[in-house]
Amino acid sequence: MEKFIERLLEEDIKFEKDVNNGLSDINIFDALNIETKENYHSKFIAYLIDINKDHYQKNFAKVFLEKLGKSLVNTKFENLNIEDIKSVEIEACIKDNRRIDILITLSD
């Protein structure tokens, strides 16, 4: 029992550090019981990427583009910034009547 309590206290300290650093295990999709509903995920992610929405946050879009750029090294997408985002659409039609979950259109 002593080991269990010791481990529990260690986890509590780790959790507090994570919370203080802005990290959390909370998943909004789990909380709303929609963790398997892809369309909700796409809508929410697109909402966060679209800097013209009323959330007034640019952080998510900025970090998203930074991560995207790191995975597309040596391409024209390597150094994107939020000013490059022209529009964000969900369920956009593409060739042959197919759809793409999130389409980010960039300015030229």
Image (spheres, rainbow, N blue to C red):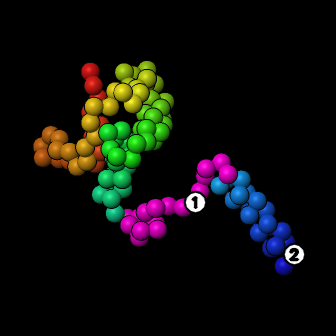
User: Is residue 74 shown left or right of residue 94?
Assistant: right
Residue 17 picture location, percent across and down: 71, 53
Residue 87: percent from the left, percent from the top? 26, 36
For label 1, the residue is 25
Q: Sort mark 2 into few (<14), some (14-19) or many (20+) by Cα contacts within 10 Å.
A: few
Q: Residues within 10 Å of mark 1 (few under 14, many from 20)?
A: few
Placement of the C terminus among the 4 image quadrants = top left
Residue located 67% across and 51% down the image: 20
Q: Is residue 83 left or right of residue 15?
A: left
Is residue 31 one of those drawn in magenta?
A: yes
Identify the element where label 1 is drawn: loop
Give the residue furthest to the bottom.
1
Q: Main secondary structure of the magenta part?
A: loop
Quadrant of image for the N terminus:
bottom right
Q: Which residues are magenta?
A: 20-36
> Disc 2 designates what residue?
2
